[in-house]
Image (tube, rainbow, N blue to C red):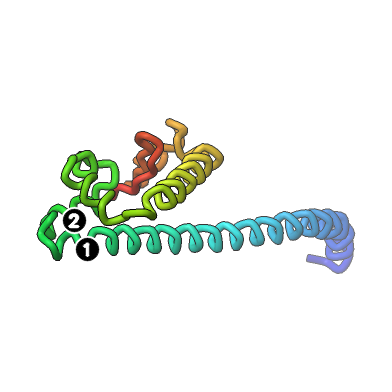
């Protein structure tokens, strides 16, 4: 390549570089915004997972004395913990034992559970978890979130 060809090439590259730099600025701003959203999303997912664990511990602690006094078996407790929308929660013996265990805190406990349920249903709707197209994508990725009777359950 002769010297004059390089001069022409450089002249042609300047507008491309300027355009690229202008585009980069826009891309950089978009990338920074996307990074902030992604970071906030991870933080919120982490918080939601902490709430899930805390809730599970509360339910486990609620059920443990029922295992110790023989009201329910260890297997039944595991079924209650692993199948939150399962029929085990509908057993009259379980419902009576849990109500007795809650005692005077039953109304407050149920109010907190209803509020948490409303928040989860609202979150599921806001994030389109209930959308059939979203569910299809999750199934293709071997993850399925089922929303049944207003409860969100992770199935693997």
Q: Mark 2 to mark 1: distance in Å?
A: 8 Å
Place of residue 155 in the rendered image (x, y in percent of width and height, measured from the top left): 30, 47
- Pair 2/1: label in front: 1
Mark 2 is surrounded, within 10 Å at the Cα level, by few (under 14), some (14 to 19) or many (20 or more) other residues, namely some
Nearest the eye: 123 or 34:
123
Q: Which residue is mark 1?
A: 64
- Give the residue drawn at x 23%, y 43%: 89
Q: Which residue is mark 2?
A: 77
Query: Quadrant of the image for the N terminus?
Result: bottom right
Place of residue 32 in the rendered image (x, y in percent of width and height, measured from the top left): 71, 61
- Give the residue drawn at x 45%, y 35%: 130
Place of residue 92 in the rendered image (x, y in percent of width and height, measured from the top left): 18, 40
- Give the residue drawn at x 37%, y 54%: 104
Q: Residue furthest top?
A: 132
Mark 2 vs 1: CB contact within 8 A: yes
- Give the residue drawn at x 13%, y 60%: 74
Place of residue 65 in the rendered image (x, y in percent of width and height, measured from the top left): 20, 63
- Could you tell whether 87 is left or right of 144 in the image? left
Nearest the eye: 109 or 12:
109
Answer with the quarter of the image where residue 147 lies.
top left
Q: Is residue 28 above or below residue 3?
A: above
Mark 1 is surrounded, within 10 Å at the Cα level, by few (under 14), some (14 to 19) or many (20 or more) other residues, namely some
Mark sitting earlier along the chain (2/1): 1
């Amino acid at each position: 390549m002769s010297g004059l060809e390089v001069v022409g090439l450089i002249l042609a590259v300047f507008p491309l570089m300027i355009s690229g730099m202008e585009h980069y600025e826009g891309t950089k701003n978009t990338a920074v915004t996307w990074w902030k959203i992604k970071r906030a999303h991870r933080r919120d997912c982490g918080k939601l997972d902490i709430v899930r664990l805390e809730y599970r511990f509360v339910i486990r602690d609620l059920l443990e004395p029922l295992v110790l006094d023989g009201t329910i078996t260890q297997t039944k407790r595991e079924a209650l913990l692993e199948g939150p929308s399962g029929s085990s929660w509908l057993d009259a013996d379980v419902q009576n034992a849990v109500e007795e265990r809650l005692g005077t805190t039953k109304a407050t406990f149920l109010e907190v559970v209803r509020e948490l349920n409303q928040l989860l249903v609202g979150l599921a709707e806001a994030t389109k978890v209930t959308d059939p197209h979203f569910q299809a994508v999750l199934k293709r990725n071997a993850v399925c979130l089922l929303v049944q009777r207003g409860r969100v359950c992770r199935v693997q």
